[in-house]
Image (cartoon, helix red, strand yellow):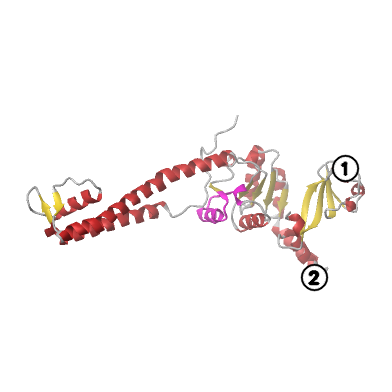
Amino acid sequence: MSQPVGRYHTLKRRSGLPLWVSIGWRVVAVLALLGLAIGVHWFDRAGLRDNYDGEISFLDVVYFTMISITTTGYGDIAPVTTQARMFDALVVTPIRVFVVLLFIGTTYDFVLKRSWEKWRMASIQRKLTNHIVVAGFGRTGSEAVDELIARGEAPASIVVVDGDPERLARAEACGCNVIQGDATRDELLTDVRIADARTLIVAAGRDDTSILITLTARHLAPDLSISVIVKAEDNEFPARAAGANTVINPVSFAGLLLASSCSGQHIADYMMDLASIDGRVQLAERRVRDEEVGQPLSAITTGLGVRLYRDGKPFSFAEPEAKALVTGDVIVEIVPRRMASA
């Protein structure tokens, strides 16, 4: 039985002005227009006639202005001079139209539009599938999202989870779906339909938080592909034990690049080339094709085969297992950038 979506959290996308600002400028505009009409009517009160007592007080002016702008028009106070009538015709009438439009616009923005947007996002949320969830939109998480979009991933297929509204605003600006909350909670991960996601990227900024997110996600989605970044080498094993398929330690990776640079100045450059969307070549991963079964890894024509995975175990192109591909093998190959993006 599927659980209801949006019970605790609702998807959002890029929003406009803050609510109080949007309402505030409308209120100020209406008051300014009313003040203008009241002021002119007061200074030209001699052009008005009160059929009740014959005198025009300031309250009479306020009363007459309000019923004129709201199109009520009881007739107890009326303009009698040409100047007063022209002011009502040429100034008060446009003010009346503008105020009505402001009220209609406010109703649309804060009732109809927001209700429609809430329903639309709830509908999108219910239909989320094969999407990418990014838990944490700090420096690493935002760079991962930028790289995904650069590689052709649709921003609408990415859901960003973070507790910081400013970070979420940046994610919304990229076109991503966002949810504010704690990704370690079962309820939130259920709301982003983690069981139907393609992959989860965990970049919470703290190793303990990232590992807890991984553990929670693995509990909810046993077959989900999870990639997590940890800062301490000691936490790589706990992250894998929590269920991460890929554990990345930027400190260790940087050490590998530095050590490689001692053997040649171009090695580190080439490794960065492989990892970046802007490189001349890229690493790609795919399953072996039927026509490739039985052939050696070196015989594939789509790229340069460098590794294969068989039953979850890695084998390099130089090992005996690479001499004959079998059904179910996963190939890691180096391909030109145009092929990776095709």
Residue at mark 1? 326
Q: Give the x, y percent position of residue 249.
A: 71, 56
Quadrant of res 36: bottom left
Asked if residue 324 lies left or right of residue 48, the reply is: right
Q: Give the x, y percent position of residue 207.
A: 64, 51
Element assignment for label 1: loop
User: Which image quadrant: the C terminus?
Assistant: bottom right
Q: Residue at x 52, y 43 (%)?
A: 121
- Answer with mark 1 or mark 2, whichever residue precedes in sequence: 2
Quadrant of res 291: top right
Residue 160 is inside the magenta segment: yes
Say which of marks 1 and 2 sits in front. 1
Element assignment for label 2: loop
Q: Give the x, y percent position of residue 329.
A: 83, 44
The foreground one among 11 and 318 is: 11
Q: Amino acid at mark 1?
A: Val
Q: Amino acid at mark 2?
A: Gln
The foreground one among 43 and 289 is: 43
Looking at the rendering, the stretch of residues picked out in magenta corresponds to 155-177
Question: Which residue is outermost to the left?
Answer: 53
On screen, residue 240 above or below 271:
above
Q: Residue at x 49, y 40 (%)?
A: 119
Residue at mark 2? 265
Marks 1 and 2 sit apart, C-alpha to C-alpha, by 38 Å
Q: Count the labels in the image.
A: 2
The foreground one among 324 and 138 is: 324
Q: Give the x, y percent position of residue 268.
A: 77, 65
